[in-house]
Image (cartoon, grey):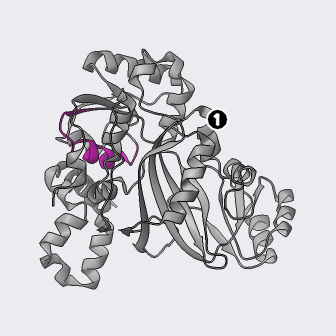
């Protein structure tokens, strides 16, 4: 079967990723390199980034980190002119936020920037507290939540039904600083003893399962999407899943469609939802207004989000792509599966079609460099 993404309109374009220090770089580059005609350029504030050895990147430019966003924008303008860049594509939260904020300093920003939300929309999506208020305002399903910034705010948790889950309202991710509390005493005692690291959102814990929706949209209209559900995890279930199953879920899509319309969202986003077994609703938990770790999985399923992001930004029309209901394992998930069932190693067709190994074989140097560097660091200890 011909992968669906190879049937998309072909067009030559050059892309500049200005926040190449972001951990998502490899995943986005693998997707962009999978379509013909893409010339990929990267600006990075880390000199020893493994992706500088990638054969898929046309140019990799190191610039020391700066506290002045204006200097960063000046660097972007310089690289755009030098490499005749068609699209500037920030991939992480910090990069996207700075680009949106200082886009007035970017030369020909109207034509060079990929589709991005407004700063207000971005901030609403990024801040779980603001998102919770937005959901409430539009009657969208989500867990009952309170925001606490100081220990005196902890009285707000009396409004909630326990158990509850707490997490930073902005930033972190990857399952960091997430806690579940069975009762009020445990919740208040924890924060009283440990302090409040940053603004926290405390939500009623939803009994059910996580399910995600990745989208590309323009002015509130969804142009492409995939829905995926985790089916394999590391020990910490708050971390991204090691394994995914792509599926259709019309009721979930309906919720996401209204959410995207309410935000008038432009650009990409990864929306975390949770199915509530008590009332049978899909409830919005958070929005990651950036690219995501499983973007390669979406590509394997049939949707190349970075490519479509460029096409939509260029104004090209395309039919909303479908996707296959494949199972996907990350490299960590594959390693975990091999430890459980060693015969998986002999299922080469499965490995090639359901894991990122195809991308590693196409561009092995970054992975090799990272692996060798980690071994040397461990040896030095």
Quadrant of image for the C terminus:
bottom left
Quadrant of image for the N terminus:
bottom left
Count the numbered circles shown.
1
Asked whether residue 32 is drawn in magenta, I would say yes
Residue 126 higher or lower than 155, as above or below? above
Secondary structure of the residue carrying numbered label 1: helix
Is residue 44 found left or right of 175 in the rendered image? left
At x 75%, y 60%, the residue is: 195
Is residue 224 found left or right of 32 in the rendered image? right
Residue 207 higher or lower than 49, as above or below? below
Return the residue at label 1: 120
Residue 215 picture location, percent across and down? 45, 49
Residue 166 picture location, percent across and down? 68, 64
Asked whether residue 102 is drawn in magenta, I would say no
Residue 289 higher or lower than 336, as above or below? above
The span picked out in magenta is 22-41
At x 27%, y 19%, the residue is: 84
How many neighbours does mark 1 have within 10 angstroms: few (below 14), some (14-19), or many (20 or more)?
few
Q: Does the rendering let one see residue 172? A: no
At x 70%, y 58%, the residue is: 201
């Amino acid at each position: 079967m011909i992968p669906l993404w190879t049937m998309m309109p072909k067009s030559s374009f050059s892309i500049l990723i200005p926040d190449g220090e972001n951990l998502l770089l490899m995943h986005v580059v693998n997707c962009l390199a999978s379509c013909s005609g893409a010339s990929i350029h990267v600006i990075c504030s880390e000199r020893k980034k493994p992706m500088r050895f990638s054969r898929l990147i046309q140019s990799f430019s190191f610039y020391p980190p700066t506290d002045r966003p204006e200097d960063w924008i000046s660097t972007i303008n310089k690289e755009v002119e030098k490499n005749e860049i068609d699209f500037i594509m920030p991939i992480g939260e910090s990069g996207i936020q700075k680009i949106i904020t200082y886009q007035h300093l970017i030369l020909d920003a109207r034509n060079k920037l990929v589709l991005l939300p407004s700063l207000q929309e971005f901030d609403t999506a990024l801040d779980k507290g603001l998102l919770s208020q937005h959901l409430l305002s539009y009657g969208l399903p989500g867990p009952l939540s309170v925001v606490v910034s100081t220990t005196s705010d902890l009285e707000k948790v009396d409004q909630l039904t326990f158990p509850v889950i707490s997490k930073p309202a902005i930033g972190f991710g990857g399952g960091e600083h997430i806690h579940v509390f069975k009762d009020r005493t445990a919740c208040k005692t924890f924060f009283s003893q440990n302090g409040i690291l940053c603004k926290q959102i405390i939500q009623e814990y939803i009994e059910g399962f996580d399910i995600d929706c990745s989208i590309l949209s323009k002015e509130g209209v969804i142009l492409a999407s995939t829905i995926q559900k985790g089916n394999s995890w590391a020990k910490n279930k708050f971390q991204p899943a090691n394994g995914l199953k792509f599926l259709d879920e019309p009721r979930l899509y309906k919720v996401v469609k209204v959410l995207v319309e309410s935000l008038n969202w432009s650009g990409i986003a990864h929306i975390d939802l949770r199915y509530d077994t008590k009332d049978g609703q899909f409830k919005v938990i958070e929005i990651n207004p950036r690219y995501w770790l499983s973007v390669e999985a979406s590509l394997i399923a049939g949707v190349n989000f970075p490519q479509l992001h460029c096409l939509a930004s260029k104004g090209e029309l395309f039919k909303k792509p479908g996707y296959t209901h494949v199972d996907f394992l990350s490299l960590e998930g594959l390693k975990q599966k091999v430890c459980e069932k060693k015969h998986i190693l002999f299922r080469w067709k499965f490995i090639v079609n359901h894991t990122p190994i195809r991308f590693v074989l196409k561009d092995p140097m970054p992975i090799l460099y990272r692996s060798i560097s980690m071994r040397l660091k461990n040896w030095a200890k």
